């Protein structure tokens, strides 16, 4: 009897310790998240540059000078000098708009909403087409879904962009929806880690976070990544573990953009014909861990579906929203069925 009481007492203590630790972790994460990413309501931005100039005259190390304006809490426009460049080889060649990388000097951002962010990514639509903002919303949703399942993720924020395009002797104004992504260094700072900068075989990477990534990529039906070649993946070294951080989900089935295609970076054990077809790309892991991560996703089902619903008001095409939600629901139907889980995930694991 005494032994049982002691076990019960220790169990209760452990629960309180875990709750306290979780609270401290959440508070630490909020403290170490810059003001820019502590809110999720869309931020109004204004950008002015030449797309032709950015495409032709910038690269990984070459930026052009520009100005970024944003609307503060008092609805007043504030501006700061920045440098920007195009990123992404595919979009540079195939899209009208290009995703951007911004640099802001510490001295310039001090005292502004952008303080603490020396580097930022800006995701924009690809083409000038109807409902293009909806594709951006769905890629933003992918980041939000991963943030619910893994503590090791990029902070993001929606933005409404007034883009004034320089076209020689005239200008053209575009109203776009996009989102900001923090720099990898901010994730490393938040978790006391460091950017590894080299390739590590997937089976040497942390098993739990690798499984979270693998299930997530299966959720969004993404083939445009490789944990082995580190394509659209970054590695951080945190607490003596190699942690993978995924990014760039515009080729996924969840987004289902008009230009999306199945990636040639495959190493798949089966065939798929389109981007909305799911196929598991994860490596073989301990079945206990696979079940643990499976249950963790199921435990977050309500939160994930709420994350989808929270974006409903921003969609221009309700059909796009409904398809995105149904796509997420289909994933959970696979996880909820032992037979489907065994066939589509466990039965598809890679051994090399």
Image (cartoon, rainbow, N blue to C red):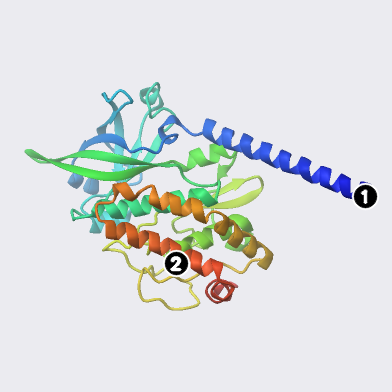
Q: Can you tell which mark lies on residue 1? A: 1
Which residue occupies 36% across, 53% down?
139
* Pointer 2 or 1: first along the chain: 1
x%, y% of residue 295? 60, 60
**Closest to the observer: 12 or 200?**
12
The residue tagged with tag 1: helix, strand or loop?
loop
Asked whether the residues under the numbered discs 2 and 1 touch, taking CB atoms below 8 Å apart as contact, a structural biologist would say no
Is 188 positioned to the left or the right of 328 in the image? right
Judge the density around disc 2: few (<14), some (14-19), many (≥20) Cα neighbours within 10 Å.
few
Q: Nearer the viewer, mark 2 or mark 1?
A: 1
Which residue occupies 25% across, 56% down?
317
The correct choice, above or below, for 34 with respect to 5 in the image is: above
Judge the density around disc 1: few (<14), some (14-19), many (≥20) Cα neighbours within 10 Å.
few
Evaluate whether residue 292 shows in this view. Answer: yes
Figure quadrant of residue 259: bottom left
x%, y% of residue 120? 38, 39
Cα–Cα span, label 2 and label 1:
48 Å
Is 351 positioned to the left or the right of 280 in the image? right
Q: Can you tell which mark lies on residue 330? A: 2
Evaluate whether residue 126 shows in this view. Answer: no
The correct choice, above or below, for 308 with respect to 39 in the image is: below
The residue tagged with tag 2: helix, strand or loop?
helix
Which residue occupies 43% across, 30% down?
35
x%, y% of residue 265? 43, 68
Figure quadrant of residue 343: bottom right
Q: Can you tell which mark lies on residue 85? A: none
The correct choice, above or below, for 250 with respect to 154 in the image is: below
Q: Quadrant of the C terminus?
A: bottom right
Which residue occupies 37% across, 64% down?
253
């Amino acid at each position: 009897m005494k032994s049982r009481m002691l076990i019960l007492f220790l169990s209760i203590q452990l629960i309180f310790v875990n709750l306290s630790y979780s609270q401290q972790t959440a508070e630490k994460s909020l403290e170490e998240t810059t003001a820019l990413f502590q809110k999720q309501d869309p931020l109004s931005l204004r950008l002015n540059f030449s797309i032709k100039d950015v495409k032709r005259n910038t690269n990984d190390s070459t930026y052009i000078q520009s100005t970024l304006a944003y609307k503060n809490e008092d609805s007043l426009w504030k501006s700061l000098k920045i440098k920007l460049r195009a990123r992404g080889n595919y979009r540079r060649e195939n899209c009208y708009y290009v995703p951007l990388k911004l640099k802001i000097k510490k001295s310039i951002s001090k005292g502004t909403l952008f303080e603490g962010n020396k580097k930022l990514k800006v995701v924009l639509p690809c083409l000038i087409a109807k409902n293009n903002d909806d594709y951006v919303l769905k890629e933003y949703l992918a980041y939000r879904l991963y943030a619910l399942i893994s503590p090791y993720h990029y902070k993001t924020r929606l933005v409404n962009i007034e883009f004034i395009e320089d076209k020689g002797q005239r200008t053209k104004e575009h109203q776009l929806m996009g989102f900001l992504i923090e720099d990898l260094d901010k994730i490393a700072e938040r978790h006391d880690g460091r950017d590894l900068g080299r390739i590590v075989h997937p089976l040497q990477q942390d098993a739990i976070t690798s499984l979270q990534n693998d299930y997530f990529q299966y959720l969004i039906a993404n083939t445009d990544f490789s944990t082995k070649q580190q394509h659209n993946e970054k590695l951080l070294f945190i607490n003596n573990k190699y942690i993978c951080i995924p990014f760039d989900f515009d080729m996924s089935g969840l987004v289902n953009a008009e230009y999306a295609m199945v990636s040639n970076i495959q190493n798949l054990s089966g065939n798929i014909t389109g981007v909305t077809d799911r196929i598991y790309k994860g490596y073989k892991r301990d079945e206990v861990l696979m079940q643990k991560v499976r249950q963790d996703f199921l435990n977050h089902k309500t939160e994930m579906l709420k994350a989808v619903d929270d974006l409903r008001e921003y969609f221009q095409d309700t059909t796009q929203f409904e398809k995105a939600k149904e796509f997420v629901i289909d994933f959970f139907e696979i996880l909820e069925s032992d037979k489907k889980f065994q066939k589509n995930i466990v039965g598809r694991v890679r051994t090399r």
